[in-house]
Amino acid sequence: MTQTPLCDALRAFAATNPLRMHMPGHKGVGLPLPELSAAAALDFTELPPTGNLFEADGPIRAAEDLWARAFGMGSCLFLTGGSTQGVLAALTLSCHPGDTVLLDRGSHRSAYNALALLNLEPVYLSRPWLPEEAVAGPISPQDVDKSLSEHPEIKTVCITSPTYYGILSDLPAISSVVHAHGARLVVDAAHGAHLPFLGDRSLSAADIAVVSAHKTLPAPGQSALLFSSLPLEELCRAASLYGSSSPSYPMMAALDAARAWMEEDGKSALARTVDAVAALRARFPALRPERLPLDPTRLVLSCADGFALKEALEAAGIYPEMADARHVVCICTASDTPGHFCRLEQALSRLLPAAPAGGLYLPPPPDPEQVCSPRAARFAPCEVLPVRAALGRVSACQVAPYPPGVPVLAPGERVTKKTIAYLNQIGYNMEKGMEVACLSLVCGVRTHGLDSEEGFPYETDPCNHQP
């Protein structure tokens, strides 16, 4: 029988009926929300029988070791702050403040936040645009090699695999290139927690990897895992910078139980999900593995108007993960039943034409000029302007519409005519507020004068107030 050391320890300790003169305040009696009350009995704090997450000891460590074995990694740390906590910790482990990092342009915003927090200088790794599929493709090992050859100072490469659309990069090949240059590979695999249970061990090629158990496994929101070849004690030190000193024991117990279930009943359930997704891909227009490397459980439907299809599905009581102008993304997991897939198929039969989507979707424009570091932009005084009024200003945030999920603007980059035209053409809300940095106050940067005949305000100084 599969081991669950943390669950067993918490149940055994609760069974002794201890007098809980410690937090949390519910004292194991129950919670005002009846649906969660059963979890209160296992909700402890750091005690000798329960262990301490960031001390790397006790039943928590025993449960983490089982996860590390399941993923073929040297060590594993439970995270109760989602993959966001993991990405921040991973880059803290891999980089020193001021380092240059080779960063997948399609990274999650947590990676961009890490640039600001750790004062890292990015060299962006662009993904190829696949016009027929209207998505960004996988990272090329050749592009990684080229970038590292041009920037020998880079010692950290951070990429995302799988993407939100389920697109997989060749991690073993990329890892070989990265290591040949004496660098480390960090992988944000937030959407790939289930892949090792399908026999895909490619994530073990990474030096540091982050997965969100809650995205694709039977685990509660914010539960995630940090894997590495580094000692667990180093992971603890880095992750404790970004996580609560009172992590949730029910969440950690749920991680322990989720692994055990996946190793027993979950594998066969996940295999059935793979078959169900393959059947839906065969019947309806969708991204398909014969055209590009895909997560076998991610269903990405192709259509002429993804937003309209998502709205129609929701009206039928079916809620996809996301939509863009050409796709609707459904996250399918081992917890989906044949009944779930039958209901989805029946709805798609009514709502989705069998013909492929028409027309091509525009690729994102070239990366804009980087005016200053992400840190300078993120922590500068800023103001909020409509996108159409931000020409010439410097973005203090990401602007990353779907598709392609790749930032059109990253912190520290100038808003150009091309970026505004692209956002307008794909239907982005031109009145939506975006943060722009008031850099003249902190580093002497001035915006270019712009021709008011083009319908944009003429500005020479981005701010006229004091911080």
Image (cartoon, rainbow, N blue to C red):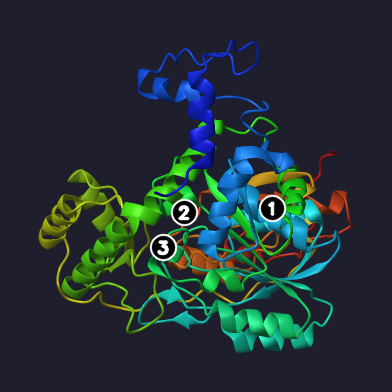
Q: Is residue 94 left or right of residue 83?
A: right
> In the rendered image, which residue does mark 3 sit on?
197
Task: Find numbered disc 3 in the image and state the secondary structure of the residue it sits on.
Answer: helix
Residue sitting at the far front: 1
Task: Find numbered disc 2 in the image and state the secondary structure of the residue it sits on.
Answer: loop
> In the rendered image, which residue does mark 1 sit on?
88
> In the rendered image, which residue does mark 2 sit on?
429
Q: How many marks?
A: 3
Residue 294: quadrant of the picture: bottom left
Residue 229: quadrant of the picture: bottom right
Closest to the camera, between mark 2 and mark 1, is: 1
Amino acid bearing label 1 = Leu
Mark carried by residue 286: none
Residue 59: quadrant of the picture: top right
As drawn, 350 above or below 279: above
- Does the rendering let one see residue 365? yes
In the rendered view of the protein, which quadrant contains the C terminus? top right
Q: CA distance from mark 3 to mark 1?
A: 26 Å
- Does the rendering let one see residue 395? no
Q: Earlier in the sequence, mark 3 or mark 1?
A: 1
Closest to the camera, between mark 2 and mark 3, is: 3
**Could you say where residue 434 lies in the image, as x and y percent from the top left?**
60, 50
Amino acid bearing label 2 = Asn
As drawn, 319 above or below 145: above
In percent of the image, x 60 and y 41: which residue is there? 60
Q: Earlier in the sequence, mark 2 or mark 3?
A: 3
User: How many C-alpha atoms fall within 10 Å of the one at disc 2: few (<14), some, or many (≥20)?
Assistant: few
User: How many C-alpha atoms fall within 10 Å of the one at disc 1: few (<14), some, or many (≥20)?
Assistant: many
Do residues under tags 3 and 1 come within 8 Å of each other at their CB atoms? Answer: no
Do residues under tags 2 and 3 come within 8 Å of each other at their CB atoms? Answer: no
**Could you say where residue 217 lies in the image, as x and y percent from the top left?**
41, 51
In percent of the image, x 31 and y 53: which residue is there? 265
